[in-house]
Image (cartoon, rainbow, N blue to C red):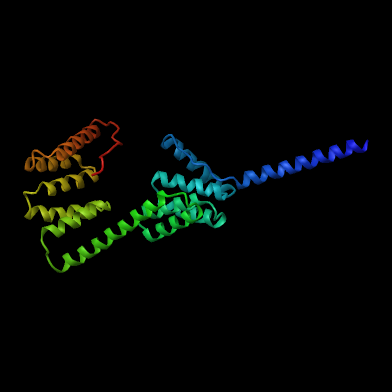
């Protein structure tokens, strides 16, 4: 075999090895891409697939990240946290892991940890400016919890009037402690039966717990007390729409709009 031919073959083999090595490196170091699920069936299918991999051969850090994100989208942040912590340990340079970890903590009201995770993400990727807004939201939520604790302590030792109880009920609604809010509103309405704000809050509490019949009834009382209030009219119409949809078995996933 001619010397030039041998050299060509060697170079071709080396090139193949080099390309294979690069392909392996790229496949094992590529960052996970965002996944947009088209519905719950597709989301649950991906969860089943990844859970199957976890049970058979274990998960790569990218698979751990993807499964965690799927859990968060399904509404199970507690299941996501250990997977994201595992992904962060194995590949600490991927900012999206810390973004998702912060969201999982935030949804569990572990606000100090959420802020810490988002701060870590920002240090890796300073362009993620929206995380500064999320951190501010977490700090504001911390202040809400502090105020709730102060009001609870105050109302245990002395009855400070309906205004403090109404404030506490509104804060409970803000953090989705609906049953606690209802209990406070029951106390408030006994002494304050002429306030549209009180009945509006009662309506919201019942809407959040899925009792739209009581929500509509309370909103109607609020509107009778303030018949020219366009905001109350809009809320009543929305509650009637959602309640009717539930009775007819229609999709009402749009739910109630925020205040």
Q: Is residue 117 left or right of residue 244?
A: right
Q: Residue at x 49, y 49 (%)?
A: 96
Q: Residue at x 27, y 58 (%)?
A: 144
Q: Residue at x 76, y 43 (%)?
A: 17
Question: From what the image shows, is residue 148 above or below residue 38?
Answer: below
> In the depicted view, which residue is nearer to us: 208 or 112?
112
Image quadrant holding the C terminus, namely top left
Question: From what the image shows, is residue 31 above or below residue 40?
Answer: below
Q: For the image shown, how many numbered marks are present on the structure? A: 0
Q: Position of residue 9 (x, y in %)?
A: 84, 37
> In the depicted view, which residue is nearer to us: 64 or 247?
64
Which residue appears farthest toward the bottom when viewing the image? 157
Image quadrant holding the N terminus, namely top right
Q: Position of residue 69 (x, y in %)?
A: 46, 46
Q: Quadrant of residue 208?
A: top left
Q: Position of residue 192 (x, y in %)?
A: 7, 53
> In the depicted view, which residue is nearer to us: 143 or 212?
143
Q: Position of residue 53 (x, y in %)?
A: 56, 45
């Amino acid at each position: 075999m001619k010397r030039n031919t041998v050299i060509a073959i060697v170079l071709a083999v080396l090139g193949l090895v080099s390309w294979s090595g690069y392909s392996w490196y790229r496949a094992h170091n590529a960052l996970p891409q965002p996944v947009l699920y088209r519905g719950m069936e597709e989301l649950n299918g991906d969860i089943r697939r990844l859970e199957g991999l976890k049970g058979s051969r274990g998960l790569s850090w990218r698979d751990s990240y993807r499964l965690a994100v799927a859990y968060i989208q399904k509404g199970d942040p507690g299941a996501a946290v250990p997977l994201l912590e595992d992904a962060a340990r194995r590949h600490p340079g991927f900012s999206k892991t810390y973004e998702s970890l912060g969201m999982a903590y935030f949804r569990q009201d572990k606000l100090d940890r959420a802020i810490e995770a988002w701060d870590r993400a920002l240090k890796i990727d300073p362009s993620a400016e929206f995380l500064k807004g999320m951190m501010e939201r977490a700090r504001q939520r911390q202040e809400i919890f502090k105020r709730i604790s102060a009001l609870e302590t105050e109302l245990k030792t002395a009855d400070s009037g309906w205004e403090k109880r109404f404030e506490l009920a509104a804060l409970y609604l803000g953090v989705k402690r609906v049953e606690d809010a209802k209990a406070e509103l029951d106390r408030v309405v006994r002494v304050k039966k002429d306030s549209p704000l009180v009945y509006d809050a009662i309506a919201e509490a019942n809407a959040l717990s899925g009792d739209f019949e009581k929500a509509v009834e309370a909103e109607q009382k609020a509107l009778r007390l303030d018949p020219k209030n366009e905001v109350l009219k809009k809320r009543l119409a929305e509650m009637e729409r959602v309640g009717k949809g539930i009775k007819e078995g229609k999709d009402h996933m749009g739910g109630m709009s925020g205040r």
